[in-house]
Amino acid sequence: MDYFEFYNLPVSFNIDEKTLKKEYIRMSKKYHPDFHTLVSDDEKALVLEMSSLNNKAFQTLSDPYLRIGYVLELQEVLSEGNKNEVPQDFLLEMMEINEELMTAELEENSGGSEALTEKVHAIERNLIDHLKRDTASYDAGSRGPELMNSIRDSFLKLKYVMRIKARLGQ
């Protein structure tokens, strides 16, 4: 059972946070181990499993970034069997940024570091805008492979940018 099915929600990149929280609380009450103390060991194990599923589902669906990855996996666009590579031109751009970052670190150049930080933020904003536009199209009913590949590419690029931001101390 996938997380959306567990909460009786449609598969979507942008979900209603209030409904998600309401379903999480409902399932927390339904599967809380304290309410199942007088049942068999098998039933206790099932309750613990469902409680764990509830927590993992909520953690994944409440985080927009994790949710995007999860939907892409559900749609079989992002998985170990598929190519999860970012385009070569993007990798070249990131290699240049990494080189600039290493140079700034070696020279302890705060001015260069600030310019680099702004450059990375601009790339991130662009990717987030692209993701918002594409995920809204998906949620509105578009389901073509080109759209899914575009979402996957933006997601993977954003993942790469987040690693660079971590190096920048963001």
Image: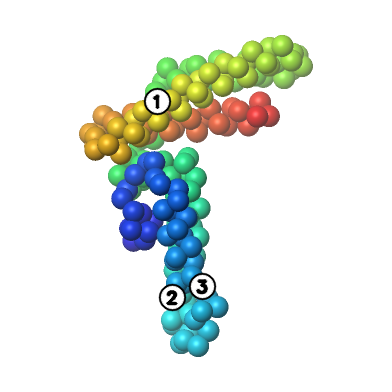
Circle 3 crowding by C-alpha within 10 Å: few under 14, some 14–19, many from 20: some
Disc number lying in front (2 or 1): 1
Q: Residue 81, can we see it?
A: no
In the rendered image, the vertical position of residue 3 relative to residue 130, given as above or below: below
Q: Earlier in the sequence, mark 1 or mark 3?
A: 3
Identified at 33% across, 58% down, the residue is: 8
Instruction: Confirm whether residue 64 shows in the render.
Output: yes
Closer to the N terminus: mark 2 or mark 1?
A: 2
Q: Nearer the viewer, residue 71 or 97?
A: 71
Residue underneath mark 1: 130
C-beta proximity under 8 Å, tags 2 and 1: no
Marks 2 and 1, how far apart in space?
41 Å
- Rate crowding at label 2 as few (under 14), some (14 to 19) or many (20 or more) other CA atoms within 10 Å: some
Q: Is residue 72 above or below residue 40?
A: above
Quadrant containing the C terminus is top right
- Residue appearing at x 51%, y 30% in the figure: 160
**Residue drawn at 27 percent across, 36 percent down:** 140
For disc 3, the marked residue is 32
**Where in the figure is residue 87, as x and y percent of width and height?**
39, 23
